[in-house]
Image: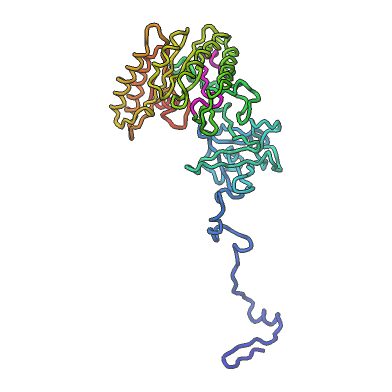
């Protein structure tokens, strides 16, 4: 019974059936996003989660900065994972059955930095069964340690990441896809007759170099010689990274910025062993043209006497196995000039002095004409000074068409390229552009040629 008294209404003991018959409709509200959380309902719930854009189910595609191609699970899974795909614009929902699905990886989040990557056919990416960390496969249906990866983000550009495997090594499907036989063919067909190949000291320990170095580079250097022979190219082996680092820079294999090469005789003897190893291995190849003993030693932390002593010993190491290969001695950066190497190089046979000529790092000229004048006057004068009658040959081992000029036109870059070719062409041993392929276009000779910025 319903009783109304003094403005207060109370409900009597009517049955549930009676209540439903009188008013069957409800007025209710859902409590969505409470016990089953949905992020779009209250986005602030996720504000404090590290890497909140890498939650479970996030679909990612990974594009190699150097190769310019996407990581891809072949056939959508069940086979290798390689970096050879041209990509797709349909990232979120690629068409069923299309190869673009093979480039898309779905995250299983373990914590803020550790993840599993699931591919189109529902397998997980992992290290190969051999456990050597060189190859990736997508064959496992239940992820474990080999299928667990750390995503390391670049603090300056969070869209760029590195992927670290469970064995502590970073992923690179790199050697087999970055430089291939067709690149040697391209070099031979575009007015070039040699390649300069930087190597690290650990190559002499292949296939099992000490940590943290990765084995496998020696096999690809073997391939490089085979391709060079096929296309009639000369090979310059360049020891780019010495044990302990000769300058403290990352490309010289410094792990923490310290330069320790030359501090003890052990590092020098180890380097000489590498020079002997490489020369003896390739001395019978008609493509072996020169051995570059050490790339860019730095004077401010390395005595000139240490470097010149090593150069003499390095020349002897090459001559033990090859009477014809040229021996290249890189200028000591920060010293007064490459002229300091003339006394040691002049007393030895078939020697070359290498002077790297990056206008970008040597000057801060803001105008086009200032850069051109520097090339035509200063750099030409330097090469002329080095060209002594009884001295070593001269080599511009690295240069690039890059400067500090803002907003330069294509035609102005062409003039800059022509100036450097003209002047550096005076070097009696020649020059080598840095480099064939690079994400930064003006550093990439391949891009510069294909886009008409430089003609050889």
Q: In the rendered image, is residue 422 in sight? A: no
Residue 215 picture location, percent across and down: 63, 26
Q: Please, which residue is most extreme toward the bottom here?
A: 6
> Residue at left 60%, top 88%?
9
> Residue at left 30%, top 24%?
372
Residue 72 picture location, percent across and down: 59, 36
Q: Quadrant of the C terminus?
A: top left
Residue 444 picture location, percent across and down: 44, 27
Q: Which residues are magenta?
A: 223-247
Q: Quadrant of the N terminus?
A: bottom right
316 in relation to 257, above or below: above
Q: In the rendered image, is residue 215 in sight? A: yes
Question: How many callouts does the rendering have?
Answer: 0
Left or right: 382 as drawn, with respect to 174: left
Q: Which one is in front, 410 or 225?
A: 225
Residue 230 falls within the magenta-colored stretch: yes
431 in relation to 260, above or below: above
> Residue at left 60%, top 29%?
213
Residue 453 picture location, percent across and down: 38, 26
Q: How is the image coloured?
A: rainbow
> Residue at left 61%, top 20%?
204
Left or right: 83 as drawn, with respect to 308: right
20 in relation to 109, above or below: below
């Amino acid at each position: 019974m319903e009783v109304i008294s003094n403005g207060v209404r109370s409900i009597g003991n009517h049955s549930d059936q009676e209540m439903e018959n009188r008013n069957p409709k409800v007025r209710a509200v859902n409590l969505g996003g409470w016990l089953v959380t949905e992020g779009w309902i209250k986005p602030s719930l996720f504000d404090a989660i590290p890497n909140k854009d890498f939650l479970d189910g996030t679909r990612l595609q990974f594009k190699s900065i150097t190769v310019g191609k996407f990581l891809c699970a072949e056939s959508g899974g069940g086979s290798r994972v390689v970096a050879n795909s041209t990509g797709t614009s349909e990232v979120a929902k690629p068409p069923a059955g299309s190869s673009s699905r093979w480039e898309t990886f779905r995250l299983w989040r373990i914590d803020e930095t550790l993840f599993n990557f699931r591919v189109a056919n529902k397998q997980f990416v992992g290290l190969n069964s051999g456990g050597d960390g060189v190859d990736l496969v997508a064959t496992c249906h239940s992820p474990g340690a080999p299928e667990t990866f750390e995503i390391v983000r670049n603090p300056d550009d969070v869209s760029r990441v590195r992927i670290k495997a469970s064995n502590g090594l970073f992923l690179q499907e790199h050697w087999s896809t970055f430089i291939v036989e067709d690149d040697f063919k391209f070099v031979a067909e575009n007015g070039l007759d040699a390649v300069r190949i930087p190597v690290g000291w650990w190559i002499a320990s292949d296939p099992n170099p000490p940590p943290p170095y990765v084995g496998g580079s020696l096999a690809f250097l073997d391939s490089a010689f085979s391709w060079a022979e096929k296309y009639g190219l000369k090979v310059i082996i360049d020891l780019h990274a010495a044990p302990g680092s000769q300058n403290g820079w990352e490309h010289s294999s410094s792990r923490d910025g310290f330069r320790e090469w030359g501090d003890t005789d052990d590092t020098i003897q180890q380097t000489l062993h590498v020079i002997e190893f490489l020369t003896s291995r390739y001395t019978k190849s008609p493509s072996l043209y020169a051995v570059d003993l050490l790339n860019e030693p730095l004077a401010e932390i390395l005595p000139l006497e240490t470097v010149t002593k090593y150069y003499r010993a390095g020349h002897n190491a090459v001559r033990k196995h090859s009477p014809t290969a040229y021996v290249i001695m890189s200028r000591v950066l920060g010293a007064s000039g490459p002229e300091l190497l003339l006394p040691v190089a002049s007393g030895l046979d078939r020697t070359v002095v290498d002077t790297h000529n990056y206008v970008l790092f040597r000057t801060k000229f803001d105008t086009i004409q200032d850069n051109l004048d520097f090339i035509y006057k200063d750099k030409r004068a330097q090469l002329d000074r080095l060209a002594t009658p009884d001295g070593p040959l001269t080599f511009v081992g690295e240069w690039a068409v890059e400067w500090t000029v803002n907003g330069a036109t294509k035609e102005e870059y062409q003039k800059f390229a022509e100036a450097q070719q003209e002047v550096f062409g005076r070097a009696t041993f020649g020059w080598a552009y840095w480099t064939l392929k690079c994400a930064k276009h003006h550093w990439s000779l391949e891009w510069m040629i294909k886009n008409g910025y430089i003609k050889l």
